[in-house]
Image (cartoon, grey):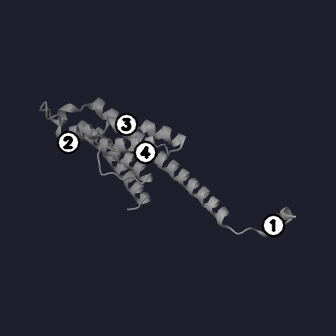
Amino acid sequence: MNARDEVTYRLALSEGFLTEAEQDVTLRRWRSCVDNSQLSVENAGKAVLAVFGVTPRTHDPARELAGVLRRGSVPTAVREVLTSMLADLLALGPQEHFMTDYGDETQYALPWDLFDQASAEDAIAAARRSLATARDATDAVRRWQEQQASTTAEANAARESPPTARSAATERSDER
């Protein structure tokens, strides 16, 4: 897959899991809502990472996103948006993924006993925010990357292009 396909795929996954989470709320399936919300947040994070060429096979995209932010190659406006996304990625990270699937094995607490309506509502709100943020961020990063590529191409073209007739004439007059 190329980066654009990966972004499209991850955003579609995020949206699909969010749709299922919303159905789970209607059915009052709190554990399932948190589980689907977690997967929505995770895939939203992976969509953002894909724009930067990072496609981790992990349930912890927060760590990778923090690395991208640390490298400092992200425009300020996008950095602020991605930093806000980190909180949801951390809250619904690998630990939550594990708890929704297996429960708390140290306490022998089943997953269905760990999640209630409030936790489901918090999780689905995070999923909605993350998907919206991922859409905005991927668009903003793509625009920024296109601007960077255009600026680089223009600079390269200016260095490589032969002098124009006007510039050659100017050079000759400067020599006199």
Name the spot of residue 73 as percent of width and height, x first.
50, 46
How many numbered circles does the render carry? Answer: 4
The CA span between labels 4 and 1 is 46 Å
Which mark is on residue 68? Answer: 4
The CA span between labels 3 and 1 is 58 Å
Circles 2, 4 touching at the beta carbon (< 8 Å): no
Name the spot of residue 72 as percent of width and height, x first.
48, 43
Mark 4, secondary structure of its residue: helix
Which residue is at a point 28% across and 38% down the rendered structure image? Answer: 34
Q: Which of marks 3 and 2 is nearer the N terminus?
A: 3
What's the residue type where badge 2 is placed? Asp
- The residue indicated by pointer 3 is 88
- Depth check, mark 2 against mark 4: the one in front is 4
Circles 4, 1 touching at the beta carbon (< 8 Å): no
Circles 2, 1 touching at the beta carbon (< 8 Å): no
The CA span between labels 2 and 4 is 29 Å
29 sits to left or right of 2: left
The C terminus - image quarter:
bottom right
Which mark is on residue 101? Answer: 2
Q: Earlier in the sequence, mark 2 or mark 4?
A: 4
- Depth check, mark 3 against mark 1: the one in front is 1
